[in-house]
Image (cartoon, rainbow, N blue to C red):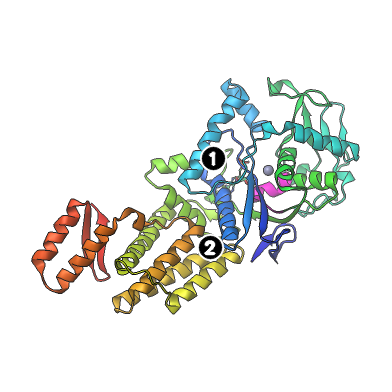
């Protein structure tokens, strides 16, 4: 297995620190609004990564934080005139609903920043003691990037123009404003009632220290993989790495993976640009979570993905082809038998599918392999070469692929075996030219809520 590591800017073979186990930290939502599909591109890529690791046999411990205190959440709560906790609660709950809609597997731990203030204070205390941090005249505590020569290694920063002692208090800033960043922000009136006691006076943590404290608490001082959208690489992850490594003296993370943006007409989908759709907006237009999931999975995670409704329509068509194929394979599996095997073309599709995913999550190639399987399987069935055992093997393979994709519907769970049996009987009646029996069975199927269409690929069941 190999992944593109932002730290080295290279594809690197993946080796976990502890054999068979992976510690994965995925920066979670800032719960100040409903997440938009751009955010879900990041969570979807992380879900895919987690599922691919699991399929390869790793036990994955994924931690996804909830940023429930930062500049944006405080601003939102103040504007709405409600307490911070109450304000963020709505969006936390919405976020978990959205994850379900998209069939994103739950992480093992969802730590909220406000539940980990003591851990953050502890970490800042260590940084002050070791001389990597200082308290400024405004009472806030800053990380001194000059004290940490390796600062800039993740985002490959050019530090030549750096002004010694310059400081930045906001959570988000760009490379032009490279400076000492806030670990602890002294209270000011913009924070309203949001403040905690600390050895440096009342205040609140900076965004970056939140993720350092929570990741190391649950995954240890060094762990395997840290991910996020590409906008997280600087300053958030750069700052996280500097704080963590300065405090522990150990390498923080082995592999840093970042997904490219979901874009709209060439621009990053974001709340600040106003060019965003929440998941709810898209569901309201009649698309399903499954279709959205398919679109987000279909492009490689390191390539910009242009969001448009045509892509959702394309996903609908692709999924219906996959559904029809699955149904056909189920029907060809016959009733009763259990022996299963894979024809050579399906073995090849399986190999290509999983090899592609283990090669830096190459989803487009993996989906290509899946559609080759559809083509070959249909061809074999049309030519009468597909045995029931092979059809069963293919259904099992689709299930296996779906442990990673999470988009292939499972009609087997919805179609009563008695219904499949009736379809087989009707097929036999038709072959015997017993039209009366065939019509009787069709009426019986209709009574059970199914219609059957005879196609060149054989009978196809559809819900009435
Ligand atoms: P935020 O809630 O702004 O902290 O973002 C949560 C996650 O979504 C982070 O990993 C971001 O990098 C990611 N993200 C935000 N906008 C986009 C986008 N347009 N495309 C892909 N990922 C994004
Ligand atoms: Zn983070």
Give the side of residue 198 with respect to residue 47, left or right: right
3D distance between C-alphas at marks 2 and 1: 24 Å
| Foreground pick, 185 / 225 | 225
Point out the residue furthest to the left here: 436
Q: What is the secondary structure assignment of the residue under circle 1?
A: loop
> Do the residues under discs 2 and 1 have CB atoms within 8 angstroms?
no
Tell me where residue 408 sits by quadrant. bottom left
Residue 104 tag number:
none
Q: At x 34% / y 67%, what residue is drawn?
A: 329
Marker disc for residue 363 = 2
**Who comes first in sequence, dot 2 or dot 1?**
1
First to last magenta residue range = 224-237
Q: Please name whichever residue, 264 or 76, is drawn nearer the observer in this view of the structure.
A: 76
User: Looking at the picture, how far across and down is residue 113, in whole percent?
Assistant: 68, 35
As rendered, which of 254 and 190 lies closer to the eye?
254
How far across and how far down the image is residue 455, in percent?
Answer: 24, 67
């Amino acid at each position: 297995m190999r992944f593109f590591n932002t730290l080295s800017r290279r594809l690197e073979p993946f080796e976990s620190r502890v054999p068979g186990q992976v510690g994965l930290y995925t920066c979670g939502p800032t719960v100040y609004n409903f997440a938009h599909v751009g955010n879900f591109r990041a969570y979807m890529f992380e879900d895919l990564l987690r599922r691919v690791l699991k399929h390869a046999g790793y036990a994955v411990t994924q931690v996804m934080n909830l940023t429930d205190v930062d500049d944006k959440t405080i601003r939102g709560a103040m504007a709405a005139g409600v307490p911070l906790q109450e304000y963020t609660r709505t969006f936390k709950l919405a976020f978990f609903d959205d994850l379900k809609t998209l069939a994103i597997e739950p992480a093992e731990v969802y730590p909220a920043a406000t539940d980990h203030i003591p851990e953050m204070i502890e970490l800042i205390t260590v940084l002050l003691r070791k001389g990597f941090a200082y308290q400024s005249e405004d009472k806030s505590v800053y990380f001194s990037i000059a004290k940490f020569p390796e600062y800039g290694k993740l985002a490959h920063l050019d530090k030549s123009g750096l002004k010694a002692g310059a400081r930045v208090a906001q959570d988000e800033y760009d490379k032009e404003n490279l400076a000492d960043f806030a670990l602890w922000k002294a209270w000011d009136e913009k924070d309203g009632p949001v403040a905690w006691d600390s050895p440096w006076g009342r205040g609140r943590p900076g965004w970056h220290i939140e993720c350092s404290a929570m990741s190391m608490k649950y995954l240890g001082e060094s762990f395997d993989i840290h991910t996020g959208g590409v906008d997280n690489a600087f300053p958030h992850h750069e700052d996280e790495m500097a704080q963590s490594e300065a405090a522990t003296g150990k390498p923080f993370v082995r592999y840093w993976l970042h997904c490219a943006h979901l874009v709209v007409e060439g621009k990053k989908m974001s709340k600040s640009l106003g060019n965003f759709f929440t998941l709810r907006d898209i569901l309201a237009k009649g698309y399903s979570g499954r279709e959205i999931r398919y679109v987000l999975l279909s492009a490689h995670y390191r390539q910009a993905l242009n969001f448009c409704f045509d892509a959702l329509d394309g996903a609908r068509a692709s999924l219906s082809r996959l559904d029809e194929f699955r149904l056909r394979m189920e029907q060809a599996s016959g009733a009763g038998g259990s022996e299963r095997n894979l024809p050579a073309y399906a073995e090849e599709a399986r190999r290509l599918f999983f090899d592609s995913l283990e090669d830096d999550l190459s989803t487009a190639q993996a989906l290509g392999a899946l559609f080759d399987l559809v083509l070959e399987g249909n061809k074999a069935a049309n030519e009468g070469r597909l045995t029931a055992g092979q059809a069963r093997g293919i259904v099992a393979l689709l299930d296996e692929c779906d442990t990673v994709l999470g988009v292939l519907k499972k009609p087997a769970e919805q179609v009563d075996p008695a219904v499949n049996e009736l379809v087989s009987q009707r097929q036999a009646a038709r072959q015997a030219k017993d039209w009366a029996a065939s019509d009787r069975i069709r009426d019986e199927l209709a009574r059970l809520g199914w219609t059957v269409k005879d196609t060149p690929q054989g009978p196809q069941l559809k819900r009435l």
